[in-house]
Image (cartoon, rainbow, N blue to C red):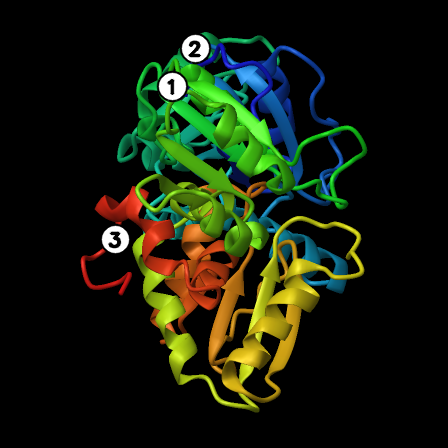
Amino acid sequence: MSTGRGRTLRGDRLHIGFFGRRNAGKSSLINAVTNQAAAIVSEIPGTTTDPVFKPMELHPLGPVVLIDTAGLDDGGDPLGTLRKERTVAVLKKTDLALLVVDGNSTNFAFEDGLVQEFENEHIPYLIVLNKVDLQLSPETEKWLLEKTHMRVSSKNRTGIDELKKKIAEIAPKEWEPPFMRDLVHPGDVIVLVAPIDLGAPKGRLIMPQVKALRDVLDAAGIAMMCRESELALTLQKLNQKPALVVTDSQAFTQVAATVPPEVALTSFSILSARQKGDLDELVKGVNAVKNLKPGDRVLVAEYCTHHPQEDDIGRKKIPRWLNDHVGGVLQFDTVVGSDFPADLKDYNLVVHCGACTANRKEIMGRIKQAAEQGIPITNYGIMISYLKGVFPRALKPLENCIAPTRNK
């Protein structure tokens, strides 16, 4: 990811989690790494209660999110257990983990358990000995002999610059695919069809539209944007056919009928499905629609919190279209944000939003979870293209990401 792309969305930043015992110095280390008071520091154990997400630029890495977590040894009382559960949930969002230890411990079973969690989740990690300015216990020295680690002092800023370089060295270089810039060649005319979204803040575009515009510009393409009501006029005014048309999924029917069949067509949500998840698995999941029957249960997962509209896409339109498709009434449950159930076995299908505000690590975890439980999962845009008869055409621009038999 380029560091010169301006304001990078939180979901598109590398997520770096700071984990460890209470009072190991996680918050102090964040402040030293950022060279600012980004986290509240106190000698009282348990000062950090909920995870704190801090978007910032970290040289030489670029745009990141630093996550300050509560101590994972916090437990016993109900509040401590809740803090621990929220910290564990952060692992699902973490692209790179720092395990912070101090030098006073005599037993490292807790840290060894955390290392095992990182490895189980395939999270690259680094052990950081904080408070190196203090006397270390013999047990600490012995444990560190067997571990790749770095020694720093947040108080004296010893080793902080070296730590930042090491973070950049071990961080994943590509933690998500591009949104669409790899689909654009210099000089290509790209038409973006953007119905006025009543859920967006007044005077603003929604995130996928902004990302599409930026990617076209980054690829030296020419972006044209219009509403679906002006699409025919826009195409008439062009002196050449566009290389690609990207539409809001809800306008698929009208747009597909307007755009010549030889012109490539897809949607913002399908592009987001590729960037934030496993497109092949999500396309595989939509084929379960043909097996749905009245009474089956469907989970609709919305990642961002927004005020539901009168004819909300996830709560009204998709349920209505699916009911029409199966010729009866399905049972729908809706979850929002991080409230994704651990047990999906009561559902016949999961339909996820485009997840434009999420980071890929978390969405990939949800897709993996569904696959392990044998529950098909798909995404809004893929689902709408399937129900509106635009399925093969909408997926063709991304066919290299899909098994040949998926989009039939």
Determine the image quadrant of residue 295: bottom right
Residue in the foreground of this view, choosing between 76 and 194: 194
CB atoms of marks 1 and 3 within 8 Å? no
Label 1 residue SS:
helix
Q: Is residue 318 left or right of residue 161?
A: right
Checking the image for residue 168, the label placed there is: 1
CB atoms of marks 1 and 2 within 8 Å? yes
Q: Position of residue 34 (x, y in %)?
A: 59, 15
* Residue 262 appears in the figure: yes
Residue corresponding to mark 2:
60
Label 1 vs 2, first from the N-terminus:
2
**Residue visible at 33% across and 47% down in the picture:** 122
Residue type at mark 2: give it: Pro
Residue type at mark 3: give it: Ile
From mark 1 to mark 3, how far is it between C-alphas?
Answer: 32 Å
Label 2 vs 3, first from the N-terminus:
2
Q: Relative to 368, is 168 above or below?
A: above
**Residue visible at 74% across and 39% down in the picture:** 200
From mark 1 to mark 2, how far is it between C-alphas?
Answer: 7 Å
Residue in the foreground of this view, choosing between 159 and 54: 54
Label 1 vs 3, first from the N-terminus:
1
Residue type at mark 1: give it: Ala
Please count the marks in the image. Answer: 3
**Residue visible at 48% across and 31% down in the picture:** 235
Q: Is residue 80 left or right of residue 107?
A: right
Residue corresponding to mark 3:
402
Residue in the foreground of this view, choosing between 144 and 317: 317
Q: Position of residue 275 (x, y in %)?
A: 41, 41
Label 3 residue SS:
loop
